[in-house]
Image (cartoon, rainbow, N blue to C red):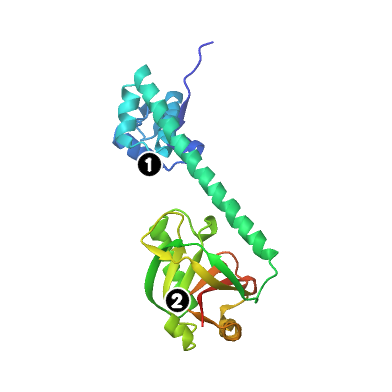
Amino acid sequence: MKNLKKFYKIGDVSKIYNISTDILRYYEKIGLLIPDSRKENGYRYYSEKQLWKLSNIRNLRKLGVGLKEITEFLETRSITKTEKMIDFQLEKIDKTIEQLLLLKSELENKKNNIIYFKNFKDYEKPMIKELDERYIYLTQGIFKEESEINLELKRLKDKVEEENDFLFTESEIGTIISQEDWEIGKYNDYSGTFIISKDKTNTTLEKGIYLTYFFKGDYKNIDEHYEKIKIYMDRNKYKAKGNIIELYHIEIHITENKNEYVTEIQIPLAKL
């Protein structure tokens, strides 16, 4: 018995491949995927050969191949050209694997950071530490509201990494209070926002001896924490010798519950 050639209407192809009929009509318009037949009633019919061709088009588009290059490849296929196209696909796949491994590492670091602070106990205890120099991306300005800070950090993040948002990176984010404002009790006036970078940048947080202080909860109580820190510094004959840093380890991008927020204050120190 003779095998009958099977044809598919444009609507069927659209459903099978989850692709809009508008795109299929556009592919026809540019000569990339022309239906095998078109009836007097206007219906377009695609053969199984055309479906195979569409699969190739979709796979190559996912790899970033332009429509012009796809058209040329499909019209002039040869062993040599297919070999080159396979090499191109392998290169793209290797790059994708590299990006996914990086994202996996960042997610693991973020998860470990969350677990660390879920089990952290040393809140509201001033500690003296030596911290290394850290490279940062910095935006300077005057910020008073939490919403302003979050917006500016988002803008800064978009400049640094276009694809990832805060939840999908291990980068630390923070703000700066000028030493002058801090000394007169203006704890909610921020002079800059920053992201700590793994790569070298033009701006750094200096290496040195710092007082570090972790607190949990809403930022609205930060005045109480800074006053507590000042009492500790007076008793131990310390003074600030630079701008004050706030690092936000657990914040709005991770939880809606402000009681779960974790903030670290870092103050560069000198002896009186």
Relative placement, left or right, of 260 versus 43 is right
Callout 2 secondary element: loop
Which label is found at residue 23? 1
Q: Earlier in the sequence, mark 2 or mark 1?
A: 1
Instruction: Give the residue type at disc 2.
Output: Asn
- The answer to whether 15 is drawn above or below residue 212 in the figure is above
Q: Are marks 2 and 1 in contact (CB under 8 Å)?
A: no
Q: Residue 221, percent across and down?
A: 59, 83
User: In this view of the protein, which residue sits in the foreground, 43 or 209?
Assistant: 209
Farthest residue toward the front?
272
> What whole-number distance in Å separates the C-alpha atoms at marks 2 and 1?
56 Å
Which label is found at residue 243? 2
- Within the image, what quadrant is residue 120 found in? bottom right
Farthest residue toward the bottom?
184
Q: Residue 74, percent across and down?
A: 35, 26
Instruction: Give the residue type at disc 1.
Output: Ile
Q: Residue 7, percent across and down?
A: 45, 26
User: In this view of the protein, which residue sits in the foreground, 6 or 199?
Assistant: 199
Q: Could you tell me if residue 186 is visible in this image?
A: no
- The answer to whether 3 is drawn above or below residue 262 in the figure is above
Callout 1 secondary element: helix
**Residue occupying the point 45% across, 41% down:** 19
